[in-house]
Amino acid sequence: MSTPSLLILPGDGIGPEVMAEVVRIIDWYGDKRGLKFDVTTDLVGGAAYDVHGVPLADETMAKAQEVDAVLLGAVGGPKYDVLDFSVKPERGLLRLRKEMDLFANLRPAQCFDALADFSSLKKDVVAGLDIMIVRELTSGIYFGEPRGIITEGNERVGINTQRYTESEIRRVAIAAFELAMKRNKKLTSMEKANVMESGILWRDVVNEVAADYPEVEVGHMYADNGAMQLVRAPKQFDVIVTDNLFGDILSDCAAMLTGSLGMLPSASLGAPMENGRPKAMYEPVHGSAPDIAGQGKANPIACILSFAMALRYSFNEGEEATRLEKAIEKVLADGVRTGDLLAGEGVTPVSTSGMGDAILAALDASL
């Protein structure tokens, strides 16, 4: 069997720092667990623009299409704000999503017990939280036509079109139901079927897909009520599936339930390749944080957890993903903290690499 392949794109700002700790984890799995990866590293975002004049070179895009998974750090920074929209660092990320046809964005919101006090909600509301939001990523109002800014009479008008086909809804719904089957067999679909025809179609198609998953408990909720319920009683949810716009909003809302963006990974999945693995890109939710770049202050956990998601969803190594997640949980329970998590008593402040050291030690202890 061929060695699984991984393209690493560290990106900008703190991206290279947090990715360096992921590489150490990858090396540990090769040395201690015999789990080898064919790793290639390349440029994306501002780093790519500095070298190639574009945020993603064609050669890098070709590599991304060939590997089993892409692991991305973060892109962007103030030095690139003056660039034309077409070559801003974020366009590299969007090109990867578009050309790899990554239609299902997986955003877990998990609250580690040791960090429950960091949430803006009461501890008993968020302690033990573990939900997964599945956001449709390639269609909807962000891509629908017509769009633009036009002039009507004496004023400008901004136009965006919410558009979904049955097949676009169906494939993301199937991805969500498959996840629900591997979790607690409970799925909530969120839309605005009360005021939007696209929401009516969304609900209809989800119900059609549900017929193929009789074991899954299915519920429907208007997205505005879903936002309210996420901050009222988030543990009522397990898997949430929703469209591009609502998913963007709801996943960020859910992210803050956990207390820190520095803790949150994500995955973007596409159709299966010839080897049966889905095309996939994994990345932390946080941005490039240029204000702390190069200072050893960044929390690498979100990027490391993104690799754990790759182990689970791209490489069928669920047990090893759990091993890594439990190692992180142990480190946090022991009070080891980067700067974003220093509040409270009995904590040990560490640098970015210090957090990597602690996680590696916990992995060693798991053997």
Image (cartoon, grey):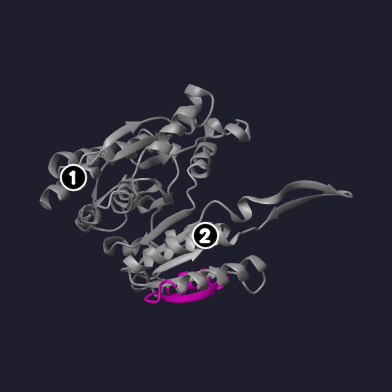
- Where residue 205 appears, as percent x and y from the top left, is 55, 68
Q: What is the crowding at mark 1: few (fewer than 14 residues within 10 Å), some, or many (at least 20)?
A: many
- Where residue 215 appears, as percent x and y from the top left, is 37, 76
Give above or below for 53 relative to 211. Answer: above
Give above or below for 149 relative to 254. Answer: above
Identify the residue at image location x=42%, y=56%: 106
- Where residue 230 appears, as percent x and y from the top left, is 46, 69
- Residue type at mark 2 is Gly
Identify the residue at image location x=53%, y=56%: 248
Helix, strand or loop at mark 1: helix
Q: Is residue 157 left or right of residue 40?
A: right
- Where residue 108 appears, as percent x and y from the top left, is 38, 59
Identify the residue at image location x=32%, y=65%: 182
Q: Is residue 323 magenta?
A: no
Q: Which residues are magenta?
A: 212-233
Visible residue check, residue 335: yes
Residue 174 vs residue 111, the one in the foreground: 174
Q: How many marks?
A: 2
Point out which mark residue 286 bears. none
Q: Are marks 2 and 1 in contact (CB under 8 Å)?
A: no
Helix, strand or loop at mark 2: helix
Visible residue check, residue 223: no
Residue 117 vs residue 232, the one in the foreground: 232
Q: Is residue 119 left or right of residue 324?
A: right
Q: Which residue is mark 1?
A: 360
Q: Which residue is mark 2?
A: 247
Q: Is residue 215 magenta?
A: yes
In which quadrant will I find the N terminus? top left
Q: Earlier in the sequence, mark 2 or mark 1?
A: 2
Q: Is residue 266 left or right of residue 26?
A: right
Q: Quadrant of residue 66?
A: top left
